[in-house]
Image (cartoon, grey):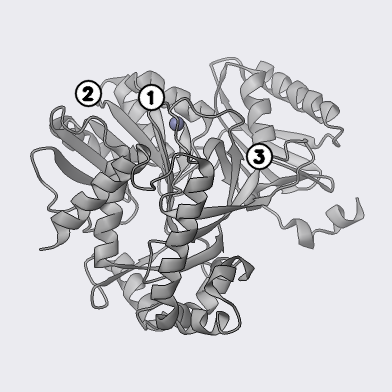
Amino acid sequence: MFRTPIILRQFIRSRQSQARWNTRSTTRAELEKWQEQRVLSFLREIVPKSPYYKRAFSTLDHSEWRKLPVIDKTEMMSCFSEMNTAGIRKEEAFHLALRAERTRDFSATLGTVTVGLSSGTTGNRGLFLVERKEAWAYAGTLLGKILPDLFKGRHRAALFLRSNSNLYEGTRNPFLEFQYFDLTRAMAEHVGSLNRFEPTLIVGPPSVLRELARFSIEGSLRISPTKIYSAAEVLEPLDRRFIEDAFRTRTDQIYQCTEGFIGVSCSHGTIHLNEDLLVIEREAVPSADGRSEYFVPVITDFTRKTQPIIRYRLNDLLLPKKRACPCGSLFTALESISGRSDDILYFGAKAVLPDFIRRALILSSEAIEEYRVIQHHPHELEIQLKCREGEQKSCRTAVGNKIAELCAEFNLEIPVLRFKYYETQSLDGKLRRVYRAFDPFNSVDTVSS
Ligand SMILES: [Zn+2]
C-alpha cells in the first residue's frame, strides 16, 4: 500500500545524506545544528504521547534534553509501559515476542506495531517496538546506505538473520531480490540454495560469513558476491582476513542493534556513524593501556517515535578515527567497533580494553588461525588457540612473549596464561573472541590488589 513510496523515499534520502543534501550541511557545525532541530521537532511530537517523557519534561524545556539522565536497557525495560508512545504494556509485548520466538512465526503484531526481543542473557533481554511505517523507512534507509551501484544490474541479497522479519518480503523489483537464510538451521543446508540464488550481496554475522568462507574454500559453495556485510557481532581482524581471502572482496560492516541503525561502512571501508538518524554523545572510557580515546556511545534517535530512544547508553566500545575519511563524510568515522563495554578485562585492578589482547594475538604469529581469550579471574587469562599444523607450541610461546611485552610497555601486571586448544562453538551463539567472564566489582581479588 504505502510501503514502496516510504521505502523509496528513505532510500533516496539516505543516499542524499551521504551527499550531504538531506542534512543540508557542509560543515560539522551545520550538521549539529540540523540535528538539534530534528531532536526538538521529534520531542514536540513524542513527549505528549509518552507518560514517562511528559513527566521528565514537566520541569525541563525541550531544549534542555541533554539534562535528561542517561538510561540503559535495565532502566528502559523497567519503564517500558510508560515510555512508549503506543500505550503498549510490557507484559503483552513480552507475551507476543516470546510466542513468536517459540513458533518462529514473526508475523504477529500489536495493531501496526511489531515487537522484537533482543538477544541477551535470560532476564536481561530487551523489548523493542517498531511501527510499520518506521520499519519501512528503516528498510529504505538501510538499503540506501548499503546497496552498491543500484542501477548496474540486478542485486540478489542473501540475508542471514537470527529472527526472520516480514520487512523486506515482497520487495521484488527489477533492481533487487531478497532471500532469507535461517540461522537456526545448519549452514550446510544452505549451501545448495545459495549456489542456486547466486547472491551479489551477503549480510550476516561474522561467525556465519566465516563458515561460508570455509565452504567456499572447500569448493562446495560456488558464489562470487560483490559485496559482503558483517553485522550483529564484532568483526575481528582475523576473521575479516579469512572471509576476504575466501571471497576475494572487501568485508564491510553494518553496525546495528535492536536499539537502532548506528553506522555503516562507506565506499572507502570506513564505518561512519549515522548522524542523519541519531545524535551520538560520547562517554569516555579510561584504560590502563593508555588508549583512552575509546568511548561508549549514548544515542538519541530522532526517527523512532513508537519507542523513543533518548540518551540511551549502548554497551559498545568505539574507537574514533584520528584522520578524516577520504570520502569526505561529515559523519564521525570509526577506526573500530572494539567489543562490548562489559568485555573490558582487568589485569589486577587495571582496566584493559579487548583491543589490547586482540593486538597481542594478531601481532604474535601468522600461524594462529582462530583464538579465544576468556578472563575468569583478575590474575589469569585462558587462551585458546587453533594454529597451523605443528605450530601450537611456538604460537603459545609467541603469544606469551607478546603479552609480556605489551604489559611491560603499559606497566601492567602480567597475568598467568592458561593455554588450551581452541574449542569450536555452535553458530547460534555469538562469536566472541575476547571477553571477561567474571564481575570485577564483586571480586575480592580485584578490590584487594
Ligand atoms: Zn568514509
The residue singled out by tag 3 in the image is 354
Give the spatial CA distance, label 1 vs label 2.
Answer: 17 Å
Residue at horizontal 37%, vertical 28%?
Answer: 267
Indicate which disc, 1 or 3, sits on the residue closer to the N terminus: 1
Give the spatial CA distance, label 3 vs label 2.
Answer: 35 Å
| Label tally | 3
Indicate which disc, 3 or 2, sits on the residue closer to the N terminus: 2
Give the spatial CA distance, label 1 vs label 3.
Answer: 24 Å
The answer to whether residue 441 is left or right of residue 333 is right
Mark 3 C-beta to ligand 1 under 8 Å: no
Q: Position of residue 382 (x, y in %)?
A: 69, 39
**Tag 1: Cα neighbours inside 10 Å, few (<14), some, or many (≥20)?**
some
**Tag 3: Cα neighbours inside 10 Å, few (<14), some, or many (≥20)?**
many
Indicate which disc, 1 or 2, sits on the residue closer to the N terminus: 2
Residue at horizontal 45%, vertical 78%?
Answer: 47
Secondary structure of the residue carrying tag 3 is helix
The answer to whether residue 196 is left or right of residue 373 is left
**Tag 2: Cα neighbours inside 10 Å, few (<14), some, or many (≥20)?**
some
The furthest residue to the right: 448
The residue singled out by tag 1 in the image is 250
Relative depth, front residue between 439 and 297: 297
Residue at horizontal 80%, vertical 23%?
Answer: 405
Q: Position of residue 105 (x, y in %)?
A: 23, 65
Secondary structure of the residue carrying tag 2 is loop
The residue singled out by tag 2 in the image is 222
Q: Position of residue 60 (x, y in %)?
A: 59, 78
Where ligand 1 lies, by quadrant?
A: top left
In the depicted structure, whether residue 312 falls above or below residue 93: above
Mark toward the viewer: 3 or 2: 3
In the depicted structure, whether residue 126 falls above or below residue 436: below
